Image: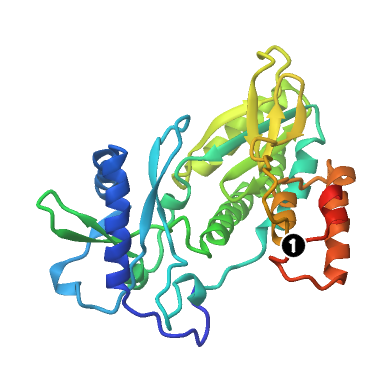
């Protein structure tokens, strides 16, 4: 949804070409150019994107620069990421012109607490969730992007589905899921009771495309998986990657759930410490201290006794009215 009275969104073709050439250079250096292009070919076959007709090339429009992300252990090894925050001097970005929706981060603690409520934790996610949602056709030209054809000439594409990276996309997905579940409850009209209970539980179990819940026993587990999968499948949303706590699993079986690490055998939730590394810079500033403190994603407050220390240090530094990049005193440096 567009913001009321937003600034005019200008054609940023030149910026998009510049960013595209930079992306292509990196792709070729990493020998990923063909694989990246094949993603667009697949999207075109599935109706996720379409070629802009020549007769519509000069219509008012906006382009999304894009780059590649590689995940070795993912079902989709390489995928495009679109930058809807890209802007030219004196012009807003697409994200500047759109409603953001509610702050979804606030949902994480309550979802994790419900995940710990019953004996068996269960998780899944929706396959290509954003690519299953369409939008008004009149908005397609503000979601264009560029790629090179086999002849080396620019090809003009536009999205036909919600784009990951656009500020309103997460809230749109959440709204679609909630609408589907509410509609299903009306259709069930209270029967059968166990299905109604599962749908009500599902309404509180989604964070964007992640489903996280808990059940009391193996029977409830199988019912939950079946009802959840069947319900979302009615709107072509595929719940996949079902995992649940199981003491018979290998002790090394771990899953990432909403930024935390879930050890399914022991059924422990742990902080993800993989990115908590720090090399003391030559000049230690408030900016460095804040950045290091925020590397610890701890929505349940597990590490509060530890993370409170640098936060109190920052509080004292604020009182000293130091600038963001000004070096802290030796005592503060030693304490940090």
Instruction: Indicate the position of residue 132 as horizontal and vertical percent values.
Output: 42, 50
Left or right: where does residue 64 sit relative to residue 259? Answer: left
Left or right: where does residue 93 sit relative to residue 290? Answer: left
Q: What residue is at 24 percent from the left and 78 percent from the top?
A: 59
Q: Is residue 311 above or below residue 267?
A: below
Residue extending farthest to the left is 151
Left or right: where does residue 268 sit relative to residue 258? Answer: right
The total of numbered circles placed on residues is: 1
Q: Is residue 239 visible?
A: yes
Of residues 15 and 257, the one drawn nearer to the viewer in this rendering = 15
Instruction: Indicate the position of residue 162 as horizontal and vertical percent values.
Output: 43, 58
Q: What residue is at 28 percent from the left and 37 percent from the top?
A: 31
Q: What residue is at 63 percent from the left and 35 percent from the top?
A: 256
- Report the residue marked by disc 1: 327
Instruction: Indicate the position of residue 81 as horizontal and vertical percent values.
Output: 42, 52
Q: Is residue 61 above or below residue 293?
A: below
Q: Is residue 199 above or below residue 4?
A: above
- Give the secondary structure at mark 1: loop
Of residues 210 and 238, the one drawn nearer to the viewer in this rendering = 210
For mark 1, does the 10 Å Cα neighbourhood hold few (<14), some (14 to 19), or many (20 or more) residues?
A: some
Q: What residue is at 88 percent from the left and 50 percent from the top?
A: 309
């Amino acid at each position: 949804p567009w913001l009321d009275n937003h600034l005019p969104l200008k054609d940023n073709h030149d910026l998009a070409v510049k960013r595209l050439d930079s992306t292509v250079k990196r792709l070729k250096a990493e020998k990923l150019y063909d694989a990246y292009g094949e993603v667009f070919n697949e999207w075109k076959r599935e109706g996720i994107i379409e070629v802009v007709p020549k007769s519509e090339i000069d219509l008012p429009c906006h382009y999304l620069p894009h780059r590649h992300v590689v995940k070795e252990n993912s079902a989709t090894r390489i995928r495009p990421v679109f930058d809807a925050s890209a802007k030219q001097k004196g012009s807003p970005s697409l994200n500047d012109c759109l409603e953001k929706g509610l702050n979804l981060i606030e949902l994480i603690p309550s979802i994790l607490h419900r995940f710990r409520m019953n004996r068996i934790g269960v998780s899944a996610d929706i396959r290509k969730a954003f690519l299953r949602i369409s939008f008004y056709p009149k908005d397609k030209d503000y979601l264009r992007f560029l790629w090179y054809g086999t002849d080396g000439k620019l090809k003009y594409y536009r999205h036909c589905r919600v784009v990951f990276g656009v500020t309103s996309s997460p809230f749109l997905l959440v709204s679609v899921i909630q609408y589907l579940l509410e509609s299903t409850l009306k259709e069930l009209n209270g029967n059968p009771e166990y299905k109604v209970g599962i749908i009500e539980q599902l309404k509180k179990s989604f964070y964007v495309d992640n489903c996280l819940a808990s059940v009391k026993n193996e029977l409830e587990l199988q019912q939950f998986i079946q009802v959840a999968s069947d319900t979302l499948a009615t709107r072509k949303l595929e719940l996949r990657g079902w995992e649940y706590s199981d003491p018979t699993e290998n002790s090394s079986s771990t899953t990432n759930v909403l930024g935390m690490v879930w050890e399914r055998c022991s059924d422990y939730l742990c902080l993800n410490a993989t990115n908590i590394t720090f090399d003391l810079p030559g000049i230690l500033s408030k900016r460095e201290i804040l950045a290091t403190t925020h590397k610890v994603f701890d929505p349940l407050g597990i590490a509060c006794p530890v993370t409170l220390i640098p936060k109190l240090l920052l509080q004292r530094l604020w009182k000293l009215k130091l600038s963001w990049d000004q070096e802290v005193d030796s005592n503060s440096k030693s304490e940090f």
